Structures are given as structure tokens and as C-alpha cells.
Image: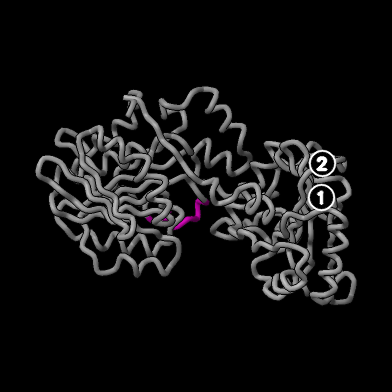
Amino acid sequence: MDFKPFSKKQLQVLCWWTEKSPHRNKDGIICDGAVRSGKSLCMFVSFILWSQFNFSDAAFAICGKTAGSVKRNIIVPMMPILVDLGYKCELLTSKGLLTVSAKGRKNTYYLFGGKDESSAALIQGMTLSGVMFDEVALMPRSFVEQAIARCSVDGSKFWFNCNPDNPGHWFYNEWIKKRSEKNILYLHFRMSENPSLSPAIIKRYEELYSGAFYERFVLGKWVAAEGTVYPMFDQQCIAQVPDNCVRFYISCDYGTVNPASFGLWGLKGSTWYRINEYYYDSKREGQLKTDEEYYTALEKLAGANKITAVICDPSAASFIALIRKKGRFKVIPARNDVLDGIRRVSDSLKNGNIKICDNCKDAIREFSLYRWDTSASFDHVKKENDHAMDDIRYFVSTVLYSRTDCVVAVAAKR
């Protein structure tokens, strides 16, 4: 492995627990700040070095949003670094554990995912000598606190890293704001503190985000999302219907009492255009529609175009079943992670990967009205003027950002 010299702050992460460090008696460390600022790399290496130096035949936990993301984003790309440092590593995927050994010492690292409240049960009953949380702000409080409670061995420590979230987030209030009373070292990272990023790459990240996501992911601030959800949506995001699209999808947000919104998407060049829409508000029209009537509208929207697939609201079970029964269209339940989906749509609008055609009047109207709920203590959008917004999010998350797009590779110079 090749490494570039570590920054001063990265060296703090690597050495805070060592004998000559003024922070060696701290019970843990929190690193937060901008994306791609080098937090995870130096924290993982430091966590392994600390555990191998201080323990043998001990158990530790490395936690992420899912066990798969821990393996993909941390363990696999960073194992070669440990090997270069003289450690023998064995990853047992079926058992969800990593063993690391050198110079007669061997420790076991269990991989856990903290995706929801039920995840706390996975780690119950263990005895740990330390735990590392990667992207702790994405994990439920119950899981994090259960993992911390497992660290009952003398000398055990806690390791946290994350990108900022809403300032009402439980981790910000319970750990970052109370770091002194919890005896925790806190280090805030900026993107410029990662020596492996060139100025051109930093500039690209700065141009990628806007609004609250820019302040969080680029500036590293814990700020609330407020105002319109898509402040970058302007006249440049609107286009005329292009000729000769080469591929087509339809995205559906199904509603009976609430409005139903279908979008027809066509690909030209590297841009997806929302070239037509169907929008029906039963409250406005004074009449409910059946699944059969919505299917008729779906066929009319498709016209003679060959539709690759219909991306459908995953909760619309009866409508999905009807589409499959009819046999004309392949139907795919949409990815429905709201906040990640909003970030993807924001990126796609800024990058010009999607454009809304000027005949999609209801989608354009909703873009101007779709707003954050500022009364909530966490990121939450108001459940109004959101039906075209949902079908657009379904399309972007499911087609433009497939699950196979999430592989991360890491290289560093020594």
C-alpha cells in the first residue's frame, strides 16, 4: 500500500491513546466533519493498533449501518494496510468477524450493522474490550448504547466517526455536546485536512451539494434542513421534450385518497428527461379511481414506447400485482429511503443528470412547494406537495443509483 503523509489531525487520531499523548486517559474519541476528510481511514488503523497493543485474545466490535457496509467500506479496502503493517488478517464473512494477529497477539473483531431498533438485540450479551462506530449518526440510539454497555473490560474505549446531521440528533446532543462530562476527545475534520484529496477533487465536492447538505458534507456543520427541499431547482433544470430518446422508464407514486403521480422518463445522451406525466388528485376531482383505471392511465402514458420497467411505490402492493398480471410491463418496487433519495435527486439536478420537461406542470409546481418540516427535531419533509417528488425520487434512487453503485475503494500512499 502507498501512503501520503498524514495530516496533523489524522496523526492526532492515530496517536491519541499512546503513552506520551495528553489524551491517553480519555475514554473515547469522536471524529466528525466533512465527507472524504480522512476520518475513517485513520480511525480504523488507530483502532486496530490500539487494540493489538493493549489486548490479546480479546473481542471488539466494528459497527456500521449494516454489516455489509462495514465489510465493503472499511474491512476489505483497509485489510491491505494492516498486512503492510505486519499483521495477519482473516475475514470470516459467514461468521461476520475479522481476526488480526501479530507477534503472538491475536484479537477478534465482530462486524455489526445498526440499521434499526431491533439491531440492539444482535450485540446483547457480549463482552467487549472496545467498539468502533463508523457513521454513528446513521445508527439508532438503542443499538449504540447497547454496544457501549458491552464494553466492560478494564481499559476499553469507544471510537465514533460520522458526518454531521440535524442539530436535534441524539448523538450530537448526548455525546458531542456532553463530550467533557463523558471524558471524550473530540476532533472536527475539514475536507482540506485529507492530504490525499487534490484541489480539483475538493472543488468537485464543493460543487456537488447545496443548502443544508453543503453545510454538512462540505463545511462539516450540524445544521437543520429548512426552506425548500430542492433549492437548486431553477430554470436550468427545465427542458423541452427531446427527440429520439433511446430508453424509457415510468416511475409511479400510487395514491387513492392522496394524489397519484406517474412520470415517463426518456434517456438522451447522458441525461434522463421526465418527458411526460400523469397526475390525478381524487380530492380535487371529487372521485376515486380503481387500480384498473390507474393501469389504463399507465398504458396511455407509456404510449408506443418500449418501457424498460415501471418503478413503483413499494407500498402499492395491489397495483404492483395488477401490473404483473397484465404482463406488458416489468415492475420493480422502488428504493424508498427518503433522505438518501433526496440527496440523490439533489445531486442529479445539480449535475444535469435529470431534467424536468416543461409539460410536467405538476412536478414543476411541487418542486416550488416541497419543504422541510422545521418543527421536527430531525430531518423530515412535510407530507404535502410530495407525490411527483416521490415518483422522481423513486426513479433516481432505483435507476440512477442502483445498489451496485455503492462499492468504495480506498488507496493511500506511504
Calculate the distance from the C-alpha at mark 2 to the C-alpha at mark 1: 8 Å
Helix, strand or loop at mark 2: strand
Residue 238 or 190: which is nearer the viewer?
A: 238
Q: Residue 209 placed where, x, y %?
A: 61, 38
Q: Residue 113 placed where, x, y %?
A: 39, 59
**Where is mark 1, residue-wise?**
364
Q: Which colour assignment does the render follow?
A: one colour
Give the residue furthest to the left.
104
Q: Which mark is residue 235?
A: none
- Residue 412 versus residue 16 in the image, above or below: above
Mark 2 vs 1, N-terminal side = 2
Q: Residue 124 placed where, x, y %?
A: 29, 68
Circles 2 and 1: CB atoms closer than 8 Å: yes
Amino acid type at mark 2: Ile
- Residue 213 versus residue 383 in the image, above or below: above
**Where is mark 2, residue-wise?**
238
Q: Residue 396 placed where, x, y %?
A: 67, 50
Q: Is residue 151 left or right of residue 1?
A: left
Which range of residues does the magenta coloring cover?
Answer: 166-174
Around disc 2, counting alpha carbons within 10 Å, would you say few (fewer than 14), some (14 to 19), or many (20 or more)?
A: some
Verify whether residue 167 appears in magenta.
Answer: yes
Whether residue 300 is visible to the viewer of this picture, yes or no, is yes
Around disc 1, counting alpha carbons within 10 Å, would you say few (fewer than 14), some (14 to 19), or many (20 or more)?
A: some
Residue at image x 90%, y 71%?
285
Whether residue 181 is visible to the viewer of this picture, yes or no, is no
Residue at image x 65%, y 50%?
399
Quadrant position of residue 143: bottom left
Verify whether residue 20 appears in magenta.
Answer: no
- Residue 387 versus residue 271 in the image, above or below: below
Q: Give the quadrant of the N terminus.
A: top left
Amino acid type at mark 1: Ile
Q: Is residue 42 left or right of residue 285?
A: left
